[in-house]
Image (cartoon, rainbow, N blue to C red):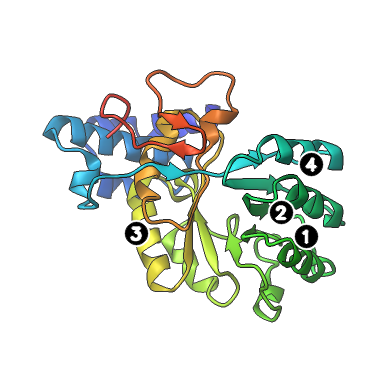
Amino acid sequence: MDGVRDAIEAVRAEIEAGCSRAELQSILPAGAARNALDCALWDLDSKLSGKRVAAVLGAGEPAPLTTAYTISLGTLEEMEAGARAASYRPLLKAKVGSEDDEARIRAIAAGAPNSRIILDANEGWTDANVARHMAIAAECNVALIEQPLPSGRDSILRTLPHPVPICADESLHVAGDLSTLVGLYDAVNIKLDKTGGLTEALALRDNAQKLGFQIMVGCMVGTSLAMAPAVLLAQDAEFVDLDGPLLLARDRSPGLRYDGSLVYPPEAELWG
């Protein structure tokens, strides 16, 4: 947080002089600081003009979305219990990423047999075990595998079968990264804290769709204010993972409305 604050303070003069969203892209690198400012400028323009961001984007009236709910990495027993407790939710994301995840994958699938499941390996698999883990995931009807191998060490994915679609997370930050991912990944996870805001995220989404990637819109742990722009971004995404506020002890007020696994578009008082 200190680093983000310092990065924002470093461009205080430009912001106070009326820096535009377009100019912001060149004075700060992609990351959390630019995301904070970019989304704040979208909100400011919306409130000054009286037009909702969704209307400015021409995207129509935004609808509630089904978000994934995260099952944290833990012991086999903890993860099975977590999956069982959340089995009423239609979409779960389970953290994996060990040398041998077979038992975890099977336990999660058994605990939530009616839920679609995303496995997030967080770069934790290896050339030696990735094919086996993907095969087990396919047996268990997993819907998506997120970042199985470390960024920059994922070239083997080009030659391996993909029995389950594979999604890039750490391997993707901005639209310029997409060309290196063709043939390796089937989907991309867009996070505003990686892209540096909604402006770059929109360009990334549009370019990714043109290249045939499925879209996942994800998040870091954060309040409803951090999720609100992503709800608009995710309106036509195949996978939505915007449960950040549900993992906090206390969200900001006003916040987004969550009803079970549905997350509703932000009211103007919150953002946009």
Give me the residue at 44% from left, 65% from top: 176
Q: Quadrant of residue 88?
A: top right
Q: Is residue 51 visible?
A: yes
**Label 4: few (<14), some (14–19) or many (≥20) C-alpha neighbours in 10 Å:** many
Nearest the eye: 13 or 114 = 114
Report the residue at 79% width, 41% height from top.
80
Position above or below: 215 against 72: below
| Residue named by callout 4 | 80
In the picture of the structure, the residue carrying the numbered disc 2 is 121
Q: Residue at x 81, y 68 (%)?
A: 132
The answer for how far apart the CA atoms under marks 3 and 2 are is 26 Å
Task: Identify the residue under disc 1.
Answer: 125
The C terminus is located in which quarter?
top left
Q: Name the residue that disc number 3 marks.
A: 203
Closer to viewer: mark 3 or mark 2: 2
Query: Does residue 62 appear left or right of residue 50 in this picture?
Result: right
Q: Is residue 14 visible?
A: no
Q: Earlier in the sequence, mark 3 or mark 2?
A: 2
Front in this rendered view, residue 206 or 45: 206
Percent position of residue 194, x then y: 49, 48
Q: Using residue 172 as the reference point, say whether residue 110 is left or right of it.
A: right
Q: CA distance from mark 3 to mark 1?
A: 30 Å
Element on which disc 2 rests: loop
Q: Are marks 1 and 2 in contact (CB under 8 Å)?
A: yes
Horizontal and vertical percent position of residue 253: 40, 18
